[in-house]
Image: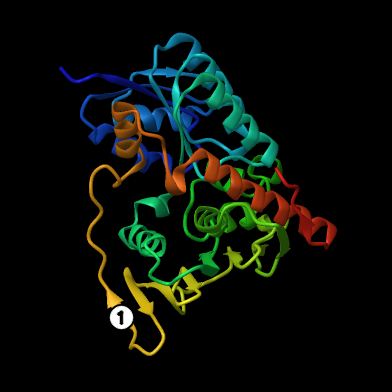
Amino acid sequence: MSEEYRVGAACLSHDHVWGELWHWKQQPGVQLTAGGDDEPELLERLQKEFDVERIYSSWQELLEKEDLQILQVAGGNSESADIVEAAAARGIHVCVEKPMAATLEQADRMLAAAERANILLLINWPTAWSAAWQELVKRIQAGDIGEVRYTRYRSAHSGPIAIGCSPQFVRDLTTPSINGAGALMDYCCYGANLAATLLGRPDKVTGMRGHFGTEPAYAASEDNAIIVAQYQHAFGVCEASWSQPVGYAEANPVVYGSSGSLAVLHGRLLLQTPGSPVQEITPAPTEEPKRSAPEYMLHCLKTGSPIEGFCSPAVSRNAQEILQAGLDSTNTLATRTLPNT
């Protein structure tokens, strides 16, 4: 008989949560049993859409009254550290929606709590389950373009209000004390995660941000940002916009190496090497166990494998450090040199 996993949802204001809960429901041996949040409207949706009857008015009450093996965390970025620490103290494995936290200090707390308790901590980056992104990393690690010298990813749309995010998610994204920043934290995080995955911790970080659009709700933080992470032999560029009214005008992400380049365009990979025509590659469909965060987390639990790649807590922590240093740089108008560890 296969092991049964009781999964609970702690906080529901991050709009990604509803898709992730469907992924949990699809996994064999999983019971989505309970949820905790202080917003009745979100709990009502949890009950109606997922038939979850056991609901609580806070994540604290959820943890006190439920016997869980896994916790899905999807609140404001600033809530994640407290929840992970409490869950880890109870031996509960945790899946957290990206980015890892609102600050580097919070990310470090999460990493320490998971290591102390020997629990799995997975940070869910939606790009991790993209066939094109998986093929991109596979070919880079195989040496197809040599040593990585430059990474860039632009994450952009016309803004969380314009694209119809829920009021709760809009509130979290546009409140710096909850989100950590605005578009910088919400969307530069993807480029930071790509750089951290391929290049690790940088030596220096420079950030810029501004409010360039017309939506006043974004003025408290920023609706556009750029972070450049400098490595010994590479740059990692992270771009974000909440004021881009169209799709992407070019391949995205792009990675240049010492002997070629790889980029993603409309789900296909473009491989360039010196003296050869551009090669278009159609990536194979994603396969088990790397089709979703719940599937991958269950695989790691059952096999004892560590969480690796984009969703690794160590990689996600390094991405958070890039974000924190970039944000600090925008405030001081100076490049931040990171300490050696």
Q: Nearer the viewer, residue 263 or 172?
A: 263
Residue 2 location, quadrant = top left
With 182 as the anchor, is 69 left or right in this view? left
Q: Nearer the viewer, residue 312 or 217?
A: 312
Q: Residue at x 32, y 30 (%)?
A: 48
With 60 as the anchor, is 146 left or right in this view? left
Vertical position of residue 122 compared to residue 30: above or below: below
Could one spot residue 124 in this view of the protein?
A: no
Q: Residue at x 23, y 44 (%)?
A: 288
Residue 71 location, quadrant = top left
Q: How far across and down, in percent of the image, does residue 154 sit? A: 53, 67
Mark 1, residue position: 279
Q: How far across and down, in percent of the image, does residue 287 sit? A: 23, 49
Could one spot residue 111 in this view of the protein?
A: yes
Q: Residue at x 49, y 73 (%)?
A: 257
Q: Given the current orientation, which residue lies at the most extreme left position?
A: 1
Q: How far across and down, in percent of the image, does residue 210 sit? A: 72, 65
Element under disc 1? strand
**In which quadrant is the C terminus drawn?**
top right
Q: How far across and down, in percent of the image, does residue 283 sit? A: 26, 65
